[in-house]
Image: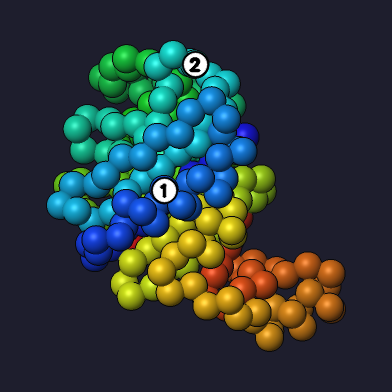
């Protein structure tokens, strides 16, 4: 289990303080290390709390690829060895043995269609420096959580809701609709959460920002 967090959007002076608070909330998910990377042009941060499983020495995150992509990734791609061999045939060279690097190469090669290639459980965000766009995705069974909110044209995300309570304009207001859903179903269905304006990415879906 790892933890991811981040924010992308208009630059504000308190961003570095906010992202530290967000990732510290989920430090328990990744006791081996915490890392924060600032995005180019002061447009945000990606953060990662790591529990080392694959390629302990070289699989640190957020990971950069081709000097273009930056990723924070929670999960495992079970068929990454097979995908790595397929990508090698297309000319890709790998410097780590991690599934994270394979995920990045797959995204570069196939774009959003790479999700059809993956067998595993995952939630991740990739920042593309060239297009200045964020790509976020979650596995089809929803094994790994992905929570997000948008405030003042800034996209915040994390593995747990409590990280998003650290955003500047978080209003501690329970969603009436979500409360009704909870009493009917015993849980709050996606994409809603118990809090207003905080959402879950549906399993098997992706979004761009």
Residue at 31%, 40% (x, y): give it. 37
Can the viewer see residue 149 in this picture?
Answer: yes
Is residue 99 positioned above or below 168 on the image? above
> Whole-percent x and y of residue 172?
58, 76
Give the number of the mark in front: 1 or 2: 1
Residue appearing at x 66%, y 45% in the figure: 143
Q: Where is residue 146 in the image (x, y as percent from the top left)?
A: 55, 54
Q: Mark 1–mark 2 contact, CB under 8 Å?
A: no
In the displayed structure image, the side of residue 95 where residue 47 appears, left or right? right
Q: Which quadrant is home to the N terminus?
A: top right
Q: What element carries label 1?
A: helix
The residue that label 1 is drawn on is 20
Give the distance between the C-alpha atoms of the residues marked 1 and 2, in whole angstroms.
Answer: 23 Å
Viewer-proximal residue, 56 or 129?
Answer: 56
Q: Mark on residue 56?
A: 2
Left or right of 192? Residue 17 is: left
Judge whether 67 appears above or below 196 on screen.
above
Q: How crowded is mark 1: few (under 14 residues within 10 Å), some or many (20 or more)?
A: some
- Pointer 2 local density, CA inside 10 Å: few below 14, some 14–19, many at least 20: some
The dot on residue 54 is none
Q: Residue at x 24, y 61 (%)?
A: 13
Helix, strand or loop for disc 2: loop
Decide if residue 6 is on the left or right side of residue 175.
left
**Image quadrant in which you'd find residue 111:** top left
Q: Is residue 46 above or below residue 150?
A: above
């Amino acid at each position: 289990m790892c933890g991811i967090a981040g924010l992308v959007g208009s630059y504000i002076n308190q961003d570095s303080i906010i992202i530290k608070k967000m990732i510290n909330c989920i430090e328990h998910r990744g006791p081996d290390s915490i890392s924060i990377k600032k995005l180019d042009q002061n447009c945000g941060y990606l953060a990662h709390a790591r529990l080392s499983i694959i390629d302990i020495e070289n699989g640190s995150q957020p990971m950069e690829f081709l000097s273009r992509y930056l990723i924070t990734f929670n999960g495992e791609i079970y068929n990454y060895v097979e995908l790595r061999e397929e990508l090698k045939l297309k000319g890709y060279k790998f410097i780590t043995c991690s599934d994270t690097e394979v995920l990045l190469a797959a995204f570069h090669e196939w774009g959003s269609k790479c999700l059809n290639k993956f067998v595993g459980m995952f939630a991740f965000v990739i920042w593309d420096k060239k297009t200045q766009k964020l790509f976020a995705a979650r596995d089809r069974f929803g094994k790994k959580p992905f929570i997000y909110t948008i405030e003042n044209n800034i996209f915040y995300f994390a593995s747990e809701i409590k990280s998003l309570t650290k955003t500047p304009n978080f209003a501690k207001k329970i969603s009436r609709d979500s409360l009704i859903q909870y009493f009917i179903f015993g849980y709050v269905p996606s994409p809603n959460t118990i809090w207003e304006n905080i959402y879950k990415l549906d399993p098997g879906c992706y979004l761009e920002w």
